[in-house]
Amino acid sequence: MATRLKNKYGPVIALVLLFHLSALALLAAADVIRHREYLDKDYYFRSPSFHQQLTEVVNLAITVHFKEKNDPKLTVTEKVGADTLEQIRETFAADLREKEEEIKGRYEANIMEAERSGNHAEASRLAQARDQELARVKQENQKQMDERIMTLAAARDQEYEQAKKALAVRGDTIKYYIKDRNTGEVYTNHSYDLNIIRNLQKKAAYSIHFPLASPSDYQIQQANEFFLANNLEGYLIIPQAAAGYSRFQDDYAYALGIRERLLNECILLAVSVIAAVGLFVYLRKRSPLDFPLADRCASLLRRVPLDVRGATVLAVGLVTLSWVRDESFFYFPIGLEHVTTLSFTAACIAYLGLNAKEAWRLINDHTLFRQQWESSLYRKFRTLLAESFANRSVFFKASLVFVLTIGLGTGMGFVLIGLHYGSERLFLVGACYSLLYLAAVLPYILRRVALLNNILRGADEMAAGNLDSLIQERGKGNLAHLARCLNNIKLGLGHALESQMKSERLKTELISNVSHDLKTPLTSIVNYVNLLKRPDLSPEEVSSYVNVLERKTHRLKVLIDDLFEASKMASGSVELHMERVNVAALLNQALAEFNDAIAESSLTFRVQTEKPHIHALADGKKTWRVFENLIGNVLKYALPHTRVYISLTEQANSVVLTMKNVSAYEIEFDPDELFERFKRGDQSRHTEGSGLGLAIAKSIMELQGGRLAIELDGDLFKVIVEFQKA
């Protein structure tokens, strides 16, 4: 039992492990790549944060020992600076002048009034009060200026003291030794003995000796330039161990901790990749039947259009890369967040792997790729867009109505905003547009909807078989054109139905005529055969009966031969030998063959040819059959004691034969029906014709690229035969 479960769920468990190991490897690789600088053991001492801290110490040392080392001995003027003092004096002098002008202006009018009135004591008192106030303002101005200058000097002193304290605080973190090469004076926080400093440098975690040949950091470069400009030499040393707290040591230990973590991640990455490859090889050897869930997922995936799949793969790929790039996974303690992150990454990899498998399948099966591409959204949208642009007028009108309707919503919004904020301009713009839409666009839409409803009702009537209803054609737009087309279709359906009914009627007549024409001679043959069986017949009667049988048999053979020939002509299975034929000579030969029949008839033939040699492109034997059938019809159906007119003319591109005679029978049907098989002008069918002559002649002419037509004018029967000119 356990073995069966293992065989059943083993591939599934291996597949899940494969995806999770791949996710773990991807997260480890992303973290190693993101922090790859920390793999270098000394990366911290090249990092921007270390250079910033180092520059702070160098600048503090330069400030305390060189730039501001004489600050305690400087006068106030030297501390503040001559330019700053001059600017302060000008500012306070301008303020004093403004106040003095205000005081003088306030007292001047009263003093002048007192002098004009002769009150010199009052004028003297006012002048004395003015001078006292001016002196007081001047004294206050001087006091404020002195306080401002002393504040700036005190701030300078405070900055110097803060720099000294900051440099002293870093004494346990970093040791410095700076020597002035010009004076030989040494500034240090460790030892004045250079040998001790050099020994400390050898055991240090980090050290730097100024001046540098080519500093890489910009801030270090500025400090280096100061050393070069003032002919200084110096050492900055970070000991292996600090007496107290050291930010350098703390940051360095943190960088080493990251390095150690990355090394462990590299090992984890290698193990995960090896295990994933092993699982992949194991799964490749399994039967596809072991993964029914994967097959179902692939089947569902194939239902998604190909371009949507491609866009989804791109989106999932970008999300996965962004996720693993920014996600912090390798930290302690391990919790639910780790499981969620790993599962989500594994799910993304599983989806991308499934799409990769399908992509490989499409690459190997180009037919399947074309099928799926044809069903993509791009192809569907392209087809839809092409169909939308097939009639640009409809597309433009629909788009315009859509835009104007959106404008209606905007206009109503303007009306509401105008009412809310009291803006007459917005209210008028929105109201005018809305009224214009209601007056012009809305009636246009309603008219089109009404016409569409009429068309739908008419289409329903047509579908129900009512071909008498008519769709109203209003206007000149596309819907009116559609209504007109539907009406034309309805008329076409009516004509088709009428033609079908006529065809059914002709088929019925054809069957009846064939039955009649074949049955008549066959009945006579049967009757005369029965008569010949009588023993009491005389030789004269036997001879008479045999002659009748011969005629009826010949009649039956002619009917059957004509029927087969008509069928061959209709099917087009006749071989023609097209050549240059003298139609005039062929016509004369045909008339000569019927010379006895013409002489026995009461008809008078009038034949007219333009010239004795008129050539056409035709089959001579088949054309002879056409002439034979036409002349035979004239002899059978022309009114006795009338004239028959035959003319042969040559035109630019054709040769035209015309036969005219007066019909002995009244033709009360469409003359085109005479071309139907077994159709005769003698509807009582008393003549000897088969009813196939004109049908055979017409088929022969059409196969030769010519034409045969019939025109009626009362009883005047006219046949027109047109050949291709050779």
Image (cartoon, helix red, strand yellow):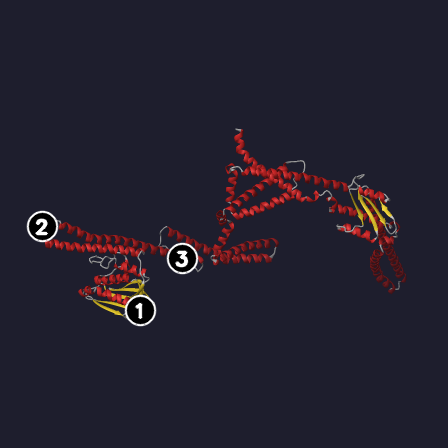
Residue highlighted by disc 2:
536
Tell me if residue 344 can be seen: no
Q: Toward which corner of the image does residue 50 lie, by quadrant? A: top right
Amino acid residing under circle 2: Asp
Mark 3 residue element: helix
Can residue 226 be seen here? The reply is yes
Query: Residue 650, which numbered label?
Result: 1
Foreground pick, 615 / 139: 615
Q: CA distance from mark 2 to mark 3?
A: 78 Å
- Viewer-side residue, 468 vs 680: 680
Q: Position of residue 17 (x, y in %)?
A: 58, 37
Disc 2 from disc 1: Cα separation:
64 Å
Percent from the top left, x then y, of residue 280?
Answer: 57, 39
Q: Which callout, 2 or 3, points at the residue further toward the start of the chain?
A: 3
Relative to 30, is 387 on the left or the right?
left
Q: Please state if 133 lies on the left or on the right of 519 as rendered.
A: right
Gap in Å between the C-alphas at discs 3 and 1? 43 Å
Label 2 or label 3, whichever lies nearer to me, is: 2
Residue lying at 56% horizontally and 46% vertically, measured from the top left: 312
**Residue 523, position as x, y percentages in the image:** 18, 51
Q: Amino acid at mark 1?
A: Glu
Residue identified by numbered label 3: 485
